Image (cartoon, grey):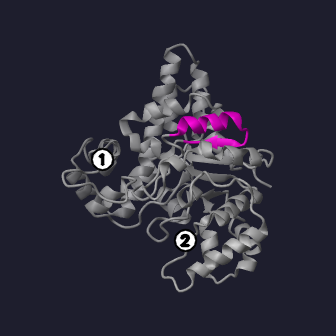
Amino acid sequence: MPSDRTIEETAEALPLVDHHVHGAFTADLTRPEFELAITESDRLGPPGCTSFDSPVGFAVRRWCAPLLDLEPHASADDYLDRRHALGAAEVNRRLLGASGVDRFLVDTGIGAGAVLDVEGMRAASGRRADEIVRLEPLAEELAAAGVGAAEFPRRLRETLAERTAATVGTKSVVAYRYGLDFDPEPPTDAEVVAAAGGWLRSLDGGEGAPRVTDPVLLRALVWAGVDRGLPVQFHAGFGDPDLELHRCDPLHLTRFLHLTAERGVPILLLHNYPFHRHAGYLAAVFPHVWFDIGLGVPYTGARASAVIAESLELAPFGKVLFSSDAWGPAELHHLGALLWRRGMANVLRGFVDAGEWSEADAVRVLTMIGGDNARRVYGLTEDYRHQ
């Protein structure tokens, strides 16, 4: 990035690395489906309420409408009519392409078939994409395949090694399945065998796909990820009602971070809102911890600059990353990038105008957080490639 560019010029042109993202929907959406997809709730609001009357809903009408050939602030009805007329593939192409994301690191652990996979994200965006392997489905796949309890520890390690041979990291949703206040100690193989036996027996005769929630097995998966040596992502903070938010404060990971500090494995704290200041503290005091504010940007809309400013209060700037955490409507992928660019430019311009920072330092930090930090942590360049 040329050093003579202003903050605003740099922000607009920066090739971002979205270090945690999911696929965009492959099918057209009805109005209820779209409204549900732009909220983290698992149910629609009561009569008289609409998801369009929210920070993210206003942002969709302001910033996504022009990309669909509409005026800014188009009505919700006009927006959805135009979206339907274009079709999902064209909407995805326009919104993903306009995001300016150079590389997507895609968590493929949710919505298979309903959202684009890694190759689909490459094709729709015209940019690079790599896979992040979610840990919990590995245990569920072993259970579905009939793997017995005695084989579980070995098969889990083998399966993880196979699945991550050509990927850049792993991700845990222990925050959803139990909470971040799990026992931080690694379980023994004997403990894993016993827990697997109880879990597998509970599945006998049951209907539907297995879902791992046993705390010992969840710990085994987390530590398998650490032992694998690739960066490990953790959902923290903001999410849908399937989690208990007070148990998703990243400060619950403090003892686990002490135990992993000498491993040299990067720990990435995702989303974090409203605990992003807590995540910034952890990134400041633990050399192997990085964090982002993820969905805190698109979902706060016009207030995204405030959340971004808070994320820059404490942690070294080399420990902060960009992500959208978008899943489903491509509007979230686009807004995650656009609102982050605008918010960062606004915040850093304020620092420079107040005489606190130089413009050159602001441009350098913007470039670090927007992509360079992720390229370093995940080994996305030859200089930092994992061996």
Q: Is residue 172 left or right of residue 294?
A: right
From mark 2 to mark 1, how far is it between C-alphas? Answer: 39 Å
Q: Write the start and end of the magenta stretch as one range.
A: 275-292
Look at the numbered disc 1 and give the secondary structure of its residue: helix
Membership of 200 in magenta stretch: no
Ranked by sequence position, the earlier of labels 2 and 1 is: 1
**Residue 324 in the image, given as x and y percentages of width and height:** 49, 48
Q: Quadrant of residue 132?
A: bottom right
Q: Quadrant of the C terminus?
A: bottom right
Looking at this view, is 17 or 22 the one in front? Answer: 22
Q: Quadrant of the N terminus?
A: top right
**Residue 213 in the image, given as x and y percentages of width and height:** 57, 66
**Residue that mark 2 sits on:** 211
Looking at this view, is 126 or 73 the one in front? Answer: 73
Q: Is residue 196 left or right of residue 204?
A: right
Q: Which mark is residue 7?
A: none
Looking at this view, is 373 or 41 the one in front? Answer: 41
**Residue that mark 1 sits on:** 65
Residue drawn at the location 78% of the way across and 47% of the way down: 264
